[in-house]
Image: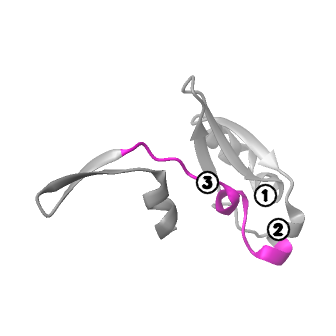
Amino acid sequence: MMGYVANLLQVCNAKGESSILLSESAFNLLDPGQRIALERHGRLVPVAIPIIEAVGGGSVRCMMRREFPAAEVRTSGSKRRLGNSDFDARH
């Protein structure tokens, strides 16, 4: 069986614990060695989203909002603080 399994996302909770979110169909395509390799980086969390994958053409990573820490940048000699809304506008 062939399929696409790279559309996954690693997330961390407030305690710093990592999880790897991926579709159930992607999870089912991984062989045991691939699962073990991924589990070194976080707990695998397969999510059943067959309709999204079939109709929308996306996967779990596409459905998640990513939160980035705020950062200060210099623009034209002044400081500006970037937040999540700045990133949302571009993605």
* Residue 13 image point, x, y percent: 60, 31
Q: Nearer the viewer, residue 48 or 64?
A: 64
Q: Which residue is mark 1?
A: 29
* Residue 8 image point, x, y percent: 65, 55
Distance between the Cα atoms at labels 3 and 1?
25 Å
The local crowd at label 1, few if under 14, some if 14 to 19, many if 20 or more residues have their Cα within 10 Å, is some
Q: Viewer-nearest of labels 3 and 1?
A: 3
Residue 27 painted magenta: no
Q: The residue under label 3 is which amino acid type?
A: Arg
Vertical relation: 83 (above or below) 16: below
Look at the numbered disc 1 and give the secondary structure of its residue.
Answer: helix
The local crowd at label 2, few if under 14, some if 14 to 19, many if 20 or more residues have their Cα within 10 Å, is some
* Residue 86 image point, x, y percent: 43, 60
Name the residue at 42% across, 42% down.
Answer: 69
Q: Which residue is mark 2?
A: 52
Look at the numbered disc 3 and give the secondary structure of its residue.
Answer: loop
* Residue 85 image point, x, y percent: 48, 57
Residue 55 painted magenta: yes
The local crowd at label 3, few if under 14, some if 14 to 19, many if 20 or more residues have their Cα within 10 Å, is few
Q: Which residue is mark 3?
A: 65
Name the residue at 57% across, 27% down.
Answer: 14
Q: The residue under label 2 is which amino acid type?
A: Ile
Residues shaded magenta:
54-70
Q: The residue under label 1 is which amino acid type?
A: Leu
Residue 14 in the figure: left or right of residue 54? left
Nearest to N terminus: mark 3 or mark 1: 1
Residue 45 in the figure: left or right of residue 69? right
